[in-house]
Image (cartoon, rainbow, N blue to C red):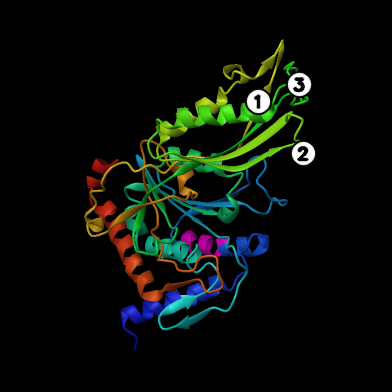
Amino acid sequence: MLDFKSSLTYLIKKDLKELCSIDSSKNSIEGIAQVQSLYRDRLSKLGMISKLVKGEGDSGVDSDDLQLLICSSQTNHERTISFICHADTVLAPFEVKLEEGKLYGSGVADNKGGALLGVMALEKCYFELSKKFNINFIVSPSEETGSHGFHGIFKEIGSMSHIVLGLEPALSSGELVDSRNGNLWVEIELEGKSGHSGRLDNDYLNAAQVQIEVYQDIQKTLSKFEETTIQITGMSTHNDSYNRVASHSKMSLDIRFNCHKSHSEIMNYFDNLSADSFSKSKIKSKPITIKTKYVDACPPMEKKKDLKFKSLTHTTFKKSGGAADINYFSHESNLCIDGLGPCGFNLHRKDEYIHLNDFTYRLQNLIELLDELSMSDDYKETL
């Protein structure tokens, strides 16, 4: 006769083997939908209703079959808790095996382990939790490629959520994630006028030279924001001759920031970037032109304050520099916690694994947090 812990470990291993055997890599639309359906079927038994939502605009896929799964409680409370996870993986399935307490499999940590953990915690806590909170459980089909087409939906759900719980793997050193940087990927393209670089009549507009002025101004402006970094990730011109100035210049920037205020002000700066501000940007009546394109604009998951939950008293938190889907749920007045899944090792490799004991430990931690929210109104002090 198995004891409770052994029985739980057996069920976790069984469920994860089934999930990790499904090909839900980015090109497997059918497999992604199959993983989503497994979560949906279990949550529907709790009374949650589900819907599949198509991406908005260019979702980065060729098929309408790649959709966002949203499972929701049929409640109408003042406050809402939303869970976010994803069904897709970077790699196709490889051998799922258990060795010395380590379970290996594609996406076992990122993110099938975390998603399963969230489902299991709700199966234990849903009845009491749904007496005080509306509950959403969202499963992205394409987090590993940016969840394009779903950011607007994430922001809308986030604006109605008071607590957002991310089921990404805990950091390998064991901490949960209380904040994530936002990022702005921006291309700045300048068009000028080519000319002989040895002539002194100045009948040219050197786009590359003005590009340097532009970058210096960006550095000066953004230096006032704390914990903001700028990296040049690409520079190019159409010019391949030493004796002609460049009529075209293009620069790619990766900008990282830690708070919503910085995000707003940085976006405002680029929205108003004009060639008129730069000394070498005109000849007679012809100005140089600047085009700014946002390739990606991800808000930060901002740390609000120290958490007061008793169930998290012995839990350590850390900032993660990378962005995730939960960033789009974050806004200035909600509380976001990420990394609630099991610790993951060797992510996106063919030896990705978790410790089964860590899964049960973190499952118990999440259950305790949800129980605390169910039984107390103290959570209001953290929001």
Residue interval drawn in magenta:
36-45
Residue occupying the point 51% across, 62% down: 39
Q: Residues within 10 Å of mark 3 (few under 14, many from 20)?
A: few
Q: Examine the rendered structure and indicate whether residue 155 appears above or below residue 208.
A: below
Q: Examine the rendered structure and indicate whether residue 317 appears above or below residue 239.
A: below
* Horizontal side of residue 121 vs 157, given as left or right: left
The residue mark sitting in front, 1 or 2, is 2
Tag 2 secondary structure: loop
Could you tell me if residue 296 is visible in this image? no
Q: Residues within 10 Å of mark 1 (few under 14, many from 20)?
A: many
Residue 40 falls within the magenta-colored stretch: yes
The C terminus is located in which quarter? Answer: top left
Residue occupying the point 25% across, 55% down: 372
User: Label 1: which residue?
Assistant: 290
**How far, Cα to Cα, is label 1 from label 2?**
21 Å
User: Label 3: which residue?
Assistant: 199
Residue 294 figure quarter: top right
**Which amino acid type is marked by label 1?**
Ile
* Horizontal side of residue 327 vs 29, given as left or right: left
Residue 377 on image: x %, y %: 23, 46
**Which amino acid type is marked by label 3?**
Arg
Could you tell me if residue 355 is visible in this image? yes
Q: Main secondary structure of the magenta part?
A: helix
**Which of marks 3 and 1 precedes in the sequence?**
3
**Which of marks 3 and 2 precedes in the sequence?**
3
User: Label 2: which residue?
Assistant: 240
Residue 217 on image: x %, y %: 52, 27
